[in-house]
Structures are given as C-alpha cells and as structure tokens.
Image (cartoon, rainbow, N blue to C red):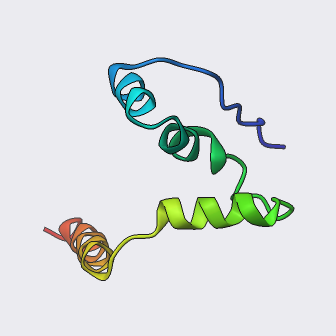
C-alpha cells in the first residue's frame, strides 16, 4: 500500500510572489490540481491537472531525445 500524499500549506518567496500577483493563479498552481492523477478525481480537478502538465511538442521531443540518449549513455 502506498503512503497517501498530502498537500500541506508551505511558504516560499516564489509562492508569495505568485499569491500577491494573482490569488487565483496561486490556487490553480498549488492546490487546484491536487489529486487530479487519481482515477476517481472530480472532472474539474482532472482537467486542471492535465492542463498544468501539458508540454508543447518541442519540450516533449526534447524529453524523448534525452531519455533515448540516457539509455545509450550506459553503453559507453
């Protein structure tokens, strides 16, 4: 059985700046997506989680390339 993850309140300079700029952005960035990875997550939470984790095709291609390079680096 896996340990349950908890999203506890924490503070950092970055979080403070985001909150002061836009409390709604802060909520979406740090709390709105929480548990969106669960199968039984509410639809809105799942959508927020997916949108938060989307990457453009260039970043996606770079990650694939680095993963393949990493697999090859073990052979040198």
Q: Residue furthest left?
A: 76
Vertical placement of residue 68 versus 8, above or below: below
Camera-side residue: 33 or 59? 33
Q: In which quadrant will I find the N terminus?
A: top right
How many marks the image carries: the answer is 0
Question: In the image, residue 62 lies at what x, y percent?
Answer: 23, 74
Q: Quadrant location of residue 70? A: bottom left
Taking the spot 61% from the left edge, 59% from the top edge, the residue there is 49
Taking the spot 53% from the left edge, 66% from the top edge, the residue there is 51
Question: In the image, residue 67 lies at what x, y percent?
Answer: 31, 71
Camera-side residue: 67 or 38? 38
Vertical placement of residue 16 versus 60, above or below: above
Q: Is residue 8 left or right of residue 61?
A: right
Taking the spot 77% from the left edge, 58% from the top edge, the residue there is 38
Taking the spot 27% from the left edge, 72% from the top edge, the residue there is 59
Q: In which quadrant will I find the C terminus?
A: bottom left
Vertical placement of residue 24 versus 62, above or below: above
Q: Is residue 21 left or right of residue 75?
A: right
Question: In the image, residue 11 lies at what x, y percent?
Answer: 47, 17
Q: Quadrant location of residue 68? A: bottom left
Question: In the image, residue 14 lies at what x, y percent?
Answer: 34, 28
Q: Quadrant location of residue 15? A: top left
Q: In this view, does 7 lie to the left or right of 61?
A: right
């Amino acid at each position: 059985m896996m340990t349950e993850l908890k999203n506890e309140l924490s503070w950092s300079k970055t979080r403070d700046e985001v909150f002061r700029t836009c409390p709604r952005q802060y909520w979406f960035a740090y709390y709105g997506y929480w548990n969106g990875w669960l199968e039984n997550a509410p639809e809105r939470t799942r959508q927020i989680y997916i949108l938060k984790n989307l990457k453009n095709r260039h970043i996606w291609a770079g990650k694939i390339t680095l993963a393949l390079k990493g697999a090859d680096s073990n052979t040198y």
